[in-house]
Amino acid sequence: MKIGLFVPCYVDALYPEVGVSTYRLLKSLGLDVDYPERQTCCGQPMGNAGFEQMAEPLVKKFDELFAPYDYVVAPSASCAAYVRFFHPNIVKGARCEAAGKTVDLVEFLHDILKIDALPAKFPHKVSVHNSCHGVRELGLSSPSERNVPKFNKIIDLLKLVDGIEVVEPERPDECCGFGGMFAVEENAVSARMGLEKVRRHIATGAEYITGPDSSCLMHMQGVAQKQGLDIKFIHVAQILSAGL
């Protein structure tokens, strides 16, 4: 199995440790992992801003680089969802092989590899943030508006980590307010949503907030720092690879 590691823009620029943790984790599982150095943005920012067709060159570039791999794994639910569900429509029937192979890290570990053990150790209380794309596009956890049995693939994986205590906030699948361009165009609403979300995470008594999207974590971290709230943030890949 040949894995192509896709590292989103904001992870590459702001949270490179998340990409490194993902790579180390996949390698520790005995996988053949490659990081194509010519990769670029998946085009999601353009799509969020209403200029989706401007992303077409990026979509074609993505497919050129990642089509040869068996799976494309990304430490980002939102970018994985954008590639899988939007790339085929942008190129309108042209070759788009990589889209169907693209998965979020949690999906890959839980649904494809079906791992049941990890050597990671993280002796802390952690509150799980279920990002919107992860819940409603990738099915990483059960959406509260649907009458389905409750599940959470992120929590399933975190429970494999030694010493961890996992909790969820009240209204666990409610948006944190980031939403890409929404945070720019409706910044006051976005900031208030983020503050309410962070407060509910803090109410669990957790030391850390974790999730599959650095973008959501970045938004909440900014709100917490501005308000002087005592909570730390960490991507799920960093916890699953802790101690490797």
Image (cartoon, grey):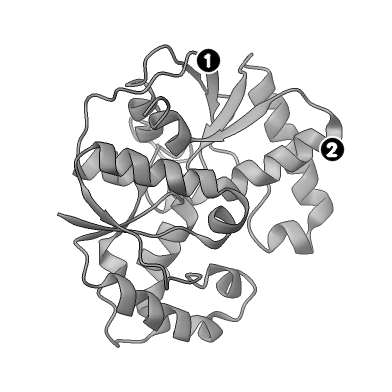
Residue 108 shows which numbered tag?
A: none
Sequence order check, earlier mark of 2 and 1? 1
x, y percentage for residue 25?
33, 38
x, y percentage for residue 38?
42, 73
* Quadrant holding the C terminus: top left
x, y percentage for residue 30?
19, 41
Residue at (55% x, 53% y) in the render? 11
Could you tell me how far apart the alpha carbons at marks 2 and 1 are, in whole angstroms? 24 Å
Residue 226 shows which numbered tag?
A: 2
Residue at (39% x, 31% y) in the render? 240
Q: Which residue is mark 1?
A: 124
Amino acid marked by disc 1: His
* Quadrant holding the N terminus: bottom left
Q: Is residue 55 left or right of residue 199?
A: left
Vertical placement of residue 9 versus 238, above or below: below
Quadrant of residue 60 in the image?
Answer: bottom left
Residue at (43% x, 71% y) in the render? 39
Mark 2 secondary-structure assignment: helix
In this rendering, the count of numbered labels is 2
Vertical placement of residue 82 versus 137, above or below: below
Residue at (36% x, 20% y) in the render? 159
Q: Is residue 176 left or right of residue 98?
A: right
Residue 172 appearing in the image? no
Q: Is residue 38 left or right of residue 99?
A: right
Amino acid marked by disc 2: Lys
Mark 1 secondary-structure assignment: loop
